[in-house]
Amino acid sequence: MSETRTPPRWLKPMNKVFVTLQRSGLKLGGMHVLTIVGRRSGKPRATPISVMDFEGERYVVGGFPGADWVKNARAASEGTLSCGRRREQVKLVELTVEEARPVLRAFPVITPSGVSIMKDAGVVSSDSPDEFEALAGICAVFRFDPLT
């Protein structure tokens, strides 16, 4: 694994495009927008994510160690998950290292679009399930639960 671990330069502008398109009601494949209150600003922060369905649960993998949205998710522990015009209030439950391993192992098979972004950033060098499983404890994994 490379030490680069920074998002590709094109990601931030593309995220803005995805958020705008989603807010207009367009569904973009498996892309969702996760909106979480910023831990410092207190303002809503929207981030496009790929929701992963695995063993009857929904998950999201933090593709970059130290990503701001992950820090905000840890602080807020809840948010709004949007896909097109559909919005859902969710609780974000961060998995332990052991709980994250099988989810990360399945990630490259279930969510191949996320693999290329993580490869571009130097987080992984291949789509090997072993390499993704090794990210447990490095990249955060959250489960979405209904907000009650």
Image: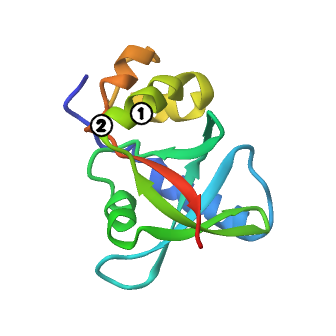
Q: Which mark is residue 97?
A: 2
| Residue occupied by mark 1 | 118
Q: Compared to 58, does 68 lie above or below? A: below
Q: Which amino acid type is marked by label 1?
A: Met
In the image, is 99 to the left or to the right of 97? right
In the image, is 23 to the left or to the right of 52? right
Q: Residue at x 77, y 70 (%)?
A: 24
Residue 126 position, x and y percent, is: 41, 16
Rounded to the nearest whole Å, what is the CA distance between mark 1 and mark 2? 19 Å
Q: Nearer the viewer, residue 3 or 91?
A: 91
For discs 1 and 2, the disc positioned in front in the rendered view = 2
Residue that sits furthest to the front in the current view: 148
- Res. 120 in view: no
Residue 70 position, x and y percent, is: 36, 57
Q: Which amino acid type is marked by label 2?
A: Val
N-term-proximal mark, 1 vs 2 = 2
Q: Compared to 98, does 91 lie above or below? A: below
Badge 1 marks a residue whose secondary structure is: helix
Q: Residue at x 38, y 15 (%)?
A: 130
Q: Nearer the viewer, residue 101 or 31?
A: 101
